[in-house]
Image (spheres, rainbow, N blue to C red):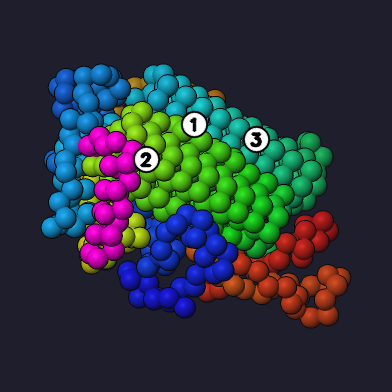
Amino acid sequence: MNLCAQCKNQFEITDANRELLERLNVPPPAVCAPCSMKRKFAFRNERTLYQDTCDLCSKQMISMYHPKAGYTVYCLECINSDAWDPLSYGQSFDFSRGFFEQFQQLIKRVPRAARMVANNENSDYINYSYHTKNSYLSFAGNMMEDCLYCNLAQESRSCVDTDYAHGSELCYECVGIQQCYACQYVVDSQNCHSSQFLKDCSDCSDCFLCCNMKHKSHCFMNTQYSKEEYEQKTKAFRQRPLDEQKSFFEQYVRGFPRRCNYNYNSEGCIGEYITKSKNCIDCYQMYEGENCRDVHTGFPGLRDSLRSCYVGEQAELVYESLASGADCQRLRWCIVAVSKSSDIDYSEFCFSSTNLFGCSGMKGKQYCIFNTQYSKDEYAVLRKKIIEHMKKTGEWGFSFDPRISPFGYNETVAMDFYPLSKDAALAQGYHWQDDIPVTTGKETISWSDIPNDIEAVDESICKEILACTATGKNYKIVKQELAFYKKFNIPLPCLHPEERHRQRMKYRNAFEFYHRQCMCNLSGHEHADRCPTEFETTYDPNRSETVFCEDCYQKEIAQ
């Protein structure tokens, strides 16, 4: 067992991990997988946006960097122009100083894009999203259209307040859905339509308040009814206040067994939300991956990668990296290296490049160190010398020091998966941003003056400033949003968009695995007493849910 240099907990490096480490030609990690993931997440700000001016053209822009963070930030037009050359910021490596100290000096000078977006239309207030149209405050989703307040909504249309969706349309307040249509308050379900308040259902239509159901229609509280009876039941239930409906749903699903994980059509995999994958261990949200370890959010075709997150399609041999793009190979300790990049170490925001070390903002370059051009032979000699220096300083093999992140911990996705207080974040070496843009006390209307019936609300509400009933934060309703609520008879949300996102994240278990035994003791399941099957799951043993192995779960829902 190894001792984590960050949290001081013990962790194991398995033989399979050692094999990958050897192929990647990297030393064994000094920190455990959770601490490693936390460090990478602290470099990804998706949701916190600021008003700022471009440091090149001085135009107003929306940026993920705080205006006083001390970095050079360009608008999207300038960052993609020929008006600047990343090689002009090159510096020689100083062997009397540490690597990370010098790298921070470089990245504060090299221009960076205000947001990570491309090929979008009428979608200014989004980030880490591509090929998206008419969307607002939606993040980390590709090919979205007319989406509002969504997160990781891939290839989805006209969804509002929906997270982790794929191929879905006209959905509201859903989490973890695939190919769903016109659904509300649906969690971890697929191929469902015209349904509300579902948990772990598939191929269901016109169902309401159901859990663990398959191939059903006109079911209410897991009971089959005629169409007329179903409509009477749902109409009566909808007369309750929305908060009461939600509370009832959450209480109701607690009485059903949970499956140990949501892995589908996968072989030899351990983790959560793994689909059509093979030999992926301790992975979270993988699709068509193979032979990966400790990967969070891997896209189709990812192979032979370790300890990385948000890794693009057809990537291979990616290690300790964040947001690497499609067709990338042999990336180690990188932040955003995309578009057929390869053989890059300790670099950030590099595109279509190869053989880089300690670089930032490079496009179509090769054989560069600290943004300085070298010949192939010069590059090889200097790179080897710097690695030996980093071994002496104890920096070689470590992922990026959180102290060089341009973001406060509370600005990043780290807060979604590893929430920390300010004191705890600072004690662990992270930054904290106290000046996040938010207003309170500016509301122009009180909730007592807003009709409960959405039909009685007119467009004048879009001119008002509301106050979140949980946090007091101010926010507004946009016209596109109001039209959606009216179409589906949904009352105005009384929570700020960020609070709504925080509430939805409660439906996703933490990225941490526990070894447990199946809790099934039901007769007829081919075991005399409690099922002896053991498994890895994201359900903490201290939680109240009853967790079944996959076999017992499938037998139970088939009843």
* Residue 388 located within the stretch drawn in magenta: yes
Q: Residue at x 69, y 38 (%)?
A: 192
Which label lies toward us, 2 or 3? Answer: 2
Question: 516 and 294: which one is in front?
Answer: 294
Instruction: Give above or below for 273 relative to 538.
Output: above
Which label's residue is closer to the chain start, 1 or 3? 1
Going from N to C along the chain, the mark reached first, 1 or 2, is 1
Instruction: Return the mark for residue 205.
Output: none
Residue 344 appears anywhere in the view = yes
Judge left or right: residue 336 versus residue 225.
left
Q: Which residue is mark 2?
A: 355
The range drawn in magenta is 371-393
Residue at the disc numbered 1? 142
Q: Position of residue 120 (x, y in %)?
A: 42, 22
x then y, percent, for residue 214: 76, 47
Q: Which residue is mark 3?
A: 179
**Earlier along the polypeptide chain: callout 2 or callout 3?**
3
Percent position of residue 134, x then y: 44, 21
Q: Amino acid at mark 2?
A: Asn
